[in-house]
Amino acid sequence: MQTLARVPFFKDVADLDFERFDRRCNWRRYNGGETVVDFEDESSDVYFIISGEVRILIRTHAGKEIILGETKAGQFFGEMAAIDGAKRSANVTALTNSELCIMPTKVFREVIFASPTTCERILRLLTGRVRELNARLAEHSIFDLKHRLYSELLRMAHHRPGRPDERAVTPPPFHHVLAARIGCRREQVTRELSAMAEEGLIEKSRGALILLQPHVLETRLNEAMREGG
């Protein structure tokens, strides 16, 4: 039997009676590339990721798509519709083969009020999302294309084992994906990445885009922030 106890988000939650909610949730596997929820869907379920990764994006009235980010095991999505009852505001597509726990709105609300630990985790995660969106809004208001790209690469990168002064984006992002994340055209991203490579700031290796001098990017962002402020 499937149980919430094996959902990464609920790991070590001791104040929740899992059996009370297990049978009221649904469990489903999605193939990579399969749509999980789409724009303006009227469903209001909340999705907890057991394994895999999904991409969340919004579409403007002009048809332009903007990637908000990727969400992995241990996180959830779909809570906005469960809270306010409005239609879905974003598209969510599985990037890899994924397994999700689908929790109906009523169950989601009951879980929040039944478990202070779960409630606090949800509040912290939502607060983190708001802070990240605020940061991106500030970047779009202050930074030009080049600096928005710097910021996005730093946000996506992780530290390299044995190379403390370098970071890596794994796998190397497609140019059109970066463009959708920072709100520009693919050709502009290609041009800026080429310029960064010529400066010795980045290097593409097998399976990763290496940020050779992340401290330089951070310094430039700080300078641009001061000038913009």
Image (cartoon, rainbow, N blue to C red):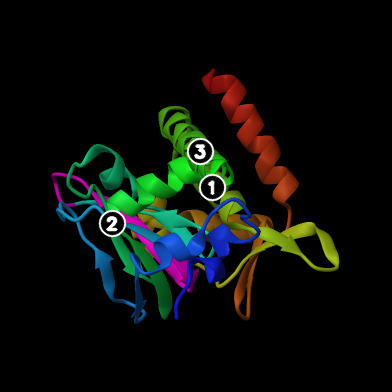
The quadrant of the image that shows the C terminus is: top right
Image x and y of residue 36, in percent: 28, 67
Residue in the image at 31% along x and 77% along y: 33
Q: Tell me: 5 left or right of 59.
A: right
| Residues under numbered marks 3 and 2 in contact, where contact means CB atoms less than 8 Å apart | no
Whole-Å distance between the Cαs marked 3 and 1? 9 Å
Local secondary structure at mark 2:
loop
Q: Which span of residues is magenta-colored?
A: 49-63
Residue assigned mark 2: 45
In the image, 210 versus 32, the foreground residue is 32
| Mark 2 vs 1, N-terminal side | 2
**Residue 183: in sight, yes or no?**
no
Few, some or many residues within 10 Å of mark 1 (<14, 14–19, 20+): many
Residue labelled with disc 3: 123
Q: Position of residue 129 (x, y in %)?
A: 48, 41
Q: Is residue 161 magenta?
A: no
Residue type beneath disc 1? Thr
Residue at 14%, 46% in the rendered image: 62
Q: Which residue is mark 1?
A: 118
- What amino acid type is highlighted by mark number 3? Leu
- Provide the secondary structure element on which disc 1 rests: helix
24 or 81, which is in the foreground?
24
Q: Earlier in the sequence, mark 3 or mark 1?
A: 1
x, y (%) of residue 185? 32, 54
Within 10 angstroms of label 2, few (less than 14), some, or many (20 or more) residues?
many
